[in-house]
Image (spheres, grey):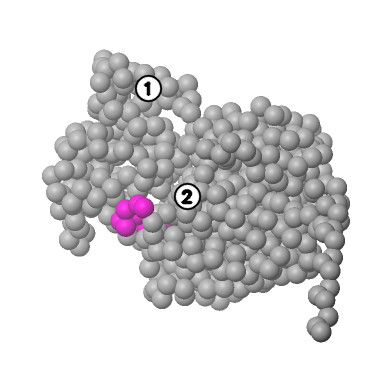
């Protein structure tokens, strides 16, 4: 007779069961994807065996997120060459975790590396990268997607957090929460509120700061004048959607209107578009960066008591670093345009004080003023420049844009590319420093994050066709006499009026004015903020700081709403990627915290 089957083992006591830890990541775009990739890379070393649930919360598609989602016009491009975009780490990223290389956008998509891909292709690349990151997680880590908005986070510092989602009555319980929110909407400031109220009262059109692909442009009528304040990448998107997006086309350097375009009058603080993307590749020796602004200098700045003034304490080092990058390239690649040996110049440059002493050195060693670095002129090229009429301004600005395009595509001026590399190096250092402020971010964007050259050639064609008109620098907008009226410092005493105003820029990502209820709740809960209204985070690992500077043990934040913001969630290969470094530090801190939790802390 067969033996009896063995009796089942008694169920283990609940306290002896291995508890599942829980991590909630709010934001499934490129930053959330980068964090998951770093969790996968570091888990074998730091987190083996214990079960972990990662809850990914975002109403937009994973990987692509809001900005890179497929549901937008194919006419909208990236502003980087396909070969200059990667979401993968390489040996230049200074981080504790392992390097996990992967293809650039152009390698993955089979594109010419010099192409400016449309955003939907980039979105597909990011979706694939997200899938790869999830697939690389060890089997004990499971990802759960929640296509909803996160509304708030609650819970004390000592206990599990509760993440409340839109349309869900019970919260997600989390041992840790990471906010990777990306670009956010904001309520209007005092000026925008007043302009919107005036528009309602007088039947005008006012479009506040917004992600351009989400703006309703239907109220901007054919042939109607429209004031546009902002000359960055949001303006480029706006012109694309209002021209080619309405049936216009380019025949060589000529724009052929469809007749459905409004007439745009654009100005800004600078009064000019961002500098063109550089259109040639690097060759030869790279400047040895960092030289004057590296980890030691950042440590010394951070150790100062009494806080920092960026222009007084930090900018002189930034200026010297960018000058070093520029002149290193000039002397090593274009020595025929210099008057002394590089070794002599480098020694004197290192010792020279900022101001007249350094300027005299450069003037004696670099005969042609076009070969000297003038950061003030690059930032504000219209400073002190005036024209007698709007017609003269149009011709003058077309000449400026043409000159910028020609220079940025001529390798004879390759020190410009060295300055770009210097800007990336400086940004990678400054993310470790508090109190940098928003001016630096705007300066960096103007020099290093401008539009593709073809977009500026299109701008020239639109200007010649009369579809785009320039207002000049220091543009101001007044609401008076039932219209919007704009003027600038470049054509004194002249103004232009319109019944429509577009603010062509993204909303400022401040805690107090964010429409995102989660961030507003963090502010009410005591989270620290900078003078510019950004969420304060610990530069070592991204933990959220309270108003006394104390890091929250269970809350992290990454992205443009923090004072640790970087140029982007992805970057050019072999440039150190500060966002990758931040992702790695946050992933490692999170894994160590989760690994070390006791059973009673996760039950």
- What secondary structure do most residues of the magenta stretch adopt? loop
Q: Please identify the residue farthest to the bottom as the structure is shown.
A: 1
Secondary structure of the residue carrying tag 1 is helix
CB contact under 8 Å: marks 1 and 2? no
Q: Quadrant of the N terminus?
A: bottom right
Q: Please identify the residue farthest to the front as the structure is shown.
A: 1
Where in the figure is residue 100, as x and y percent of width and height? Answer: 64, 72
Where in the figure is residue 347, as x and y percent of width and height? Answer: 71, 62
Q: Please identify the residue farthest to the left as the structure is shown.
A: 259
Question: Is residue 211 visible to the viewer in this orientation of the structure?
Answer: yes
Question: Which of 148/550 is in front?
Answer: 148
Residue 380 image label = none
Q: Quadrant of residue 386?
A: top left
Question: Which of 332/265 is in front?
Answer: 265
In the image, is residue 74 part of the stretch drawn in magenta?
A: yes
Which badge, 1 or 2, comes first in the chain's sequence? 2
Q: At 56% from the left edge and 54% from the top edge, which residue is drawn?
A: 145
Q: At 65% from the left edge and 44% from the top edge, which residue is drawn?
A: 172
Q: At 60% from the left edge and 47% from the top edge, which residue is drawn?
A: 26
In the figure, 314 relative to 324: above or below?
above
Instruction: Using a 10 Å C-alpha cutoff, classify the residue at mark 1 as few (fewer than 14 neighbours), some (14 to 19) or many (20 or more).
Output: many
Where in the figure is residue 375, as x and y percent of width and height? Answer: 53, 48
Q: At 79% from the left edge and 40% from the top edge, which residue is drawn?
A: 159
Where in the figure is residue 581, as x and y percent of width and height? Answer: 68, 59
In the image, is residue 60 part of the stretch drawn in magenta?
A: no
Number of numbered discs? 2
Q: What's drawn in magenta, residue-wise? A: 71-80
Q: Which residue is mark 1?
A: 195
Question: Which of 261/554 is in front?
Answer: 554
Q: Which residue is mark 2?
A: 60
Q: What distance separates the C-alpha of mark 1 from that of mark 2?
A: 31 Å
């Amino acid at each position: 007779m067969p033996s009896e089957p063995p009796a089942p083992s008694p169920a283990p006591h609940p306290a002896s069961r291995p508890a599942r830890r829980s991590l909630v990541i709010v934001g499934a775009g490129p930053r959330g994807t980068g964090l998951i990739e770093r969790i996968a890379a570091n888990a074998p070393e730091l987190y083996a065996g214990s079960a972990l649930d990662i809850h990914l919360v975002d109403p937009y598609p994973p990987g692509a997120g809001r900005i890179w989602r497929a549901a937008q016009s194919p006419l909208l491009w990236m502003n980087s060459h396909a070969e200059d975009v990667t979401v993968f780490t390489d040996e230049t990223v200074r981080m504790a975790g392992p390097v996990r290389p992967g293809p650039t956008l152009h390698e993955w998509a089979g594109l010419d590396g010099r192409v400016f891909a449309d955003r939907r292709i980039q979105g597909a690349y990011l979706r694939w990268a997200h899938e790869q990151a999830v697939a690389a997680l060890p089997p004990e880590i499971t990802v759960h997607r929640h296509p909803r908005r996160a509304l708030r986070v609650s819970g004390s510092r000592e206990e599990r957090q509760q993440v409340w989602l839109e349309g869900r009555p019970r919260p997600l319980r989390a041992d840790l929460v990471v906010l990777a929110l990306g670009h956010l909407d904001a309520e209007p400031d005092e000026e925008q509120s007043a302009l919107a109220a005036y528009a309602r009262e007088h039947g005008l059109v006012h479009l506040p700061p917004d992600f351009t692909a989400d703006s309703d442009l239907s109220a901007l009528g054919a042939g109607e004048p429209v004031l546009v304040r902002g000359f960055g990448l949001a303006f480029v998107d706006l012109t694309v959607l209002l021209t080619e997006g309405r049936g216009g086309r380019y025949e060589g350097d000529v724009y052929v209107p469809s007749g459905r375009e409004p007439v745009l009058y654009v100005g800004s603080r600078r009064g000019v578009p961002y500098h063109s993307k550089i259109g040639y590749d690097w060759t030869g020796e790279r400047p040895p960066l960092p030289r004057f602004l590296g980890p030691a200098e950042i440590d010394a700045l951070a150790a100062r008591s009494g806080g920092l003034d960026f222009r007084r304490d930090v900018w002189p080092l930034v200026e010297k670093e960018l000058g070093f990058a520029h002149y290193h390239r000039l002397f090593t690649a274009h020595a025929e345009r210099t008057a002394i040996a590089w070794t002599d110049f480098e020694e004197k440059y290192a010792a020279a004080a900022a101001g007249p002493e350094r300027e005299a050195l450069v003037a004696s060693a670099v005969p042609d003023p076009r070969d000297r670095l003038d950061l003030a002129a690059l930032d504000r090229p219209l400073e002190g420049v005036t024209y007698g009429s709007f017609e003269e301004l149009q011709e003058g600005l077309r000449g400026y844009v043409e000159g910028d395009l020609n220079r940025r595509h001529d390798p004879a001026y390759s020190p410009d590319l060295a300055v770009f590399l210097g800007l990336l190096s400086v940004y990678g250092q400054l993310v470790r420093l508090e109190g940098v402020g928003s001016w630096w971010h705007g300066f960096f964007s103007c020099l290093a994050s401008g539009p593709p050259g073809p977009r500026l050639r299109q701008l020239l064609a639109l200007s010649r066709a009369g579809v785009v008109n320039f207002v000049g620098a220091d543009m101001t907008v007044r609401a008076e006499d039932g219209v919007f009226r704009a003027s600038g410092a470049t054509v004194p005493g002249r103004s232009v009026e319109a019944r429509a105003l577009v603010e062509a820029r993204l909303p400022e990502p401040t805690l107090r004015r964010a429409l995102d209820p989660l961030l507003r709740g963090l502010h009410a809960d005591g989270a620290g903020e900078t003078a510019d209204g950004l969420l304060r985070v610990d530069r070592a690992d991204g933990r959220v700081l309270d108003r006394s500077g104390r890091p929250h043990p269970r809350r992290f934040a990454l992205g443009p709403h923090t004072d640790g913001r970087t140029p982007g969630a992805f970057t050019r290969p072999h440039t150190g990627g500060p966002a990758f470094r931040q992702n790695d530090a946050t992933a490692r801190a999170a894994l160590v915290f989760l690994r070390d939790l006791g059973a009673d802390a996760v039950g």
